[in-house]
Amino acid sequence: MIVEPAPAKLNLALHVRARRDDGYHELETLFVFVRDGDSVRLTPAERDGFAIIGPFASGLSGEGDNLVTRTRDAFRGTFGAGDPLSIVLDKHLPVASGIGGGSADAAATLRGMAQLAGVSPDDPALMAIAADLGSDVPACLAGRTMIGRGRGEQLTPIKVPPLPVLLVNPGVAVSTAAVFAGWDRIDRGALPNGDALTIALAGRNDLEPPARALAPAIDTVLDMLGAAPGVRLVRMSGSGATCFALFDREEDCATAATTIRAAQPGWWCLETALT
Ligand SMILES: C[C@@](CO)(OP(=O)(O)O)[C@H](O)COP(=O)(O)OP(=O)(O)OC[C@H]1O[C@@H](n2ccc(N)nc2=O)[C@H](O)[C@@H]1O
Ligand SMILES: Nc1ncnc2c1ncn2[C@@H]1O[C@H](COP(=O)(O)OP(=O)(O)O)[C@@H](O)[C@H]1O
């Protein structure tokens, strides 16, 4: 049995540069990962099985299609059938929330299946499968801080300090495609140069305005995070609606979490750290 962690992704900065003829957008983004997330358990079995457990299981259980089973089938398409597998997805990340839960699950499934099949984690075919599954899956397969370009699949490593971070989602799912469609098509420029923190602090998320138009609750989340003592940076991640606040001190992160949980008990709130 293998249990693969599927940590949440954040975009500390996300610059949308152009709309391509294939409908996707050219991006420049700073991908980081946090300590916590979903996990995928893979066990060789008599026949294939797939189950979803955990606090956000109900948001997905009704859907026949899941990125985990799609990934399993894509892996087999490249590397052969192998043993039947019982797969359990433990879903802790809110669905369609800009922190790449589905992409992280896909990447964890690829890593786990590669390990079971004796495929090297560096096999380039894994990255090719990842890029086919979704724009964020290559970064999640790499699983560490990266500058992403193109659709997100051109990756360059960079280091980030393990700062405390608070993630807050107001419980509104937003469609990635709808948010990109709302981008005003104005190129506001490249990612700044420098170390990861400099890039984050001087960068932007160009998807914030269209996401805020679709989900006005994001305004309230950003305001509450921005009012937290000791906060270093507040921004939305990906296409939203999850927003993050970076802190220098764990105590400040914990205080902000307590304040927000008391004011908004229905929101999802995760105190974690960059890895
Ligand atoms: C915005 C980002 C930033 O990291 O994150 P999330 O909000 O999903 O977490 C990603 O680019 C999302 O990646 P992912 O969620 O894998 O998206 P995909 O399945 O590839 O694409 C979903 C839809 O989003 C739009 N899309 C996605 C990526 C991109 N570079 N340009 C796009 O226009 C397209 O309309 C596409 O049909
Ligand atoms: N394992 C999965 N986890 C989350 N979403 C999934 C999964 N499999 C398929 N999906 C579909 O993918 C869509 C995007 O999900 P998700 O990766 O959570 O978005 P985001 O990258 O914006 O956080 C969801 O609306 C859902 O229908």
Image (cartoon, rainbow, N blue to C red):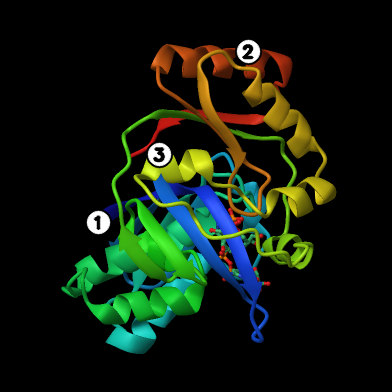
Q: CA distance from mark 1 to mark 2?
A: 40 Å
Image quarter of residue 46: bottom left
The N terminus sits in image quarter: bottom left
Residue with the mark numbered 3: 197
Asked which secondary structure carries label 1, the reply is loop
Q: Which mark is residue 1?
A: 1
Q: CA distance from mark 2 to mark 3?
A: 26 Å
x and y, in percent, of residue 246 in the image: 48, 29
Q: Residue at x 69, y 22 (%)?
A: 224
Q: Is residue 34 above or below residue 205?
A: above
x and y, in percent, of residue 121 in the image: 21, 68
Q: Residues within 10 Å of mark 3 (few under 14, many from 20)?
A: some
Q: Which mark is residue 80?
A: none
Q: Earlier in the sequence, mark 3 or mark 1?
A: 1
x and y, in percent, of residue 105 in the image: 45, 58
Q: Earlier in the sequence, mark 2 or mark 3?
A: 3
Q: Which mark is residue 259?
A: 2
The C terminus sits in image quarter: top left
- Identified by mark 1, the residue type is Met
- Identified by mark 2, the residue type is Thr
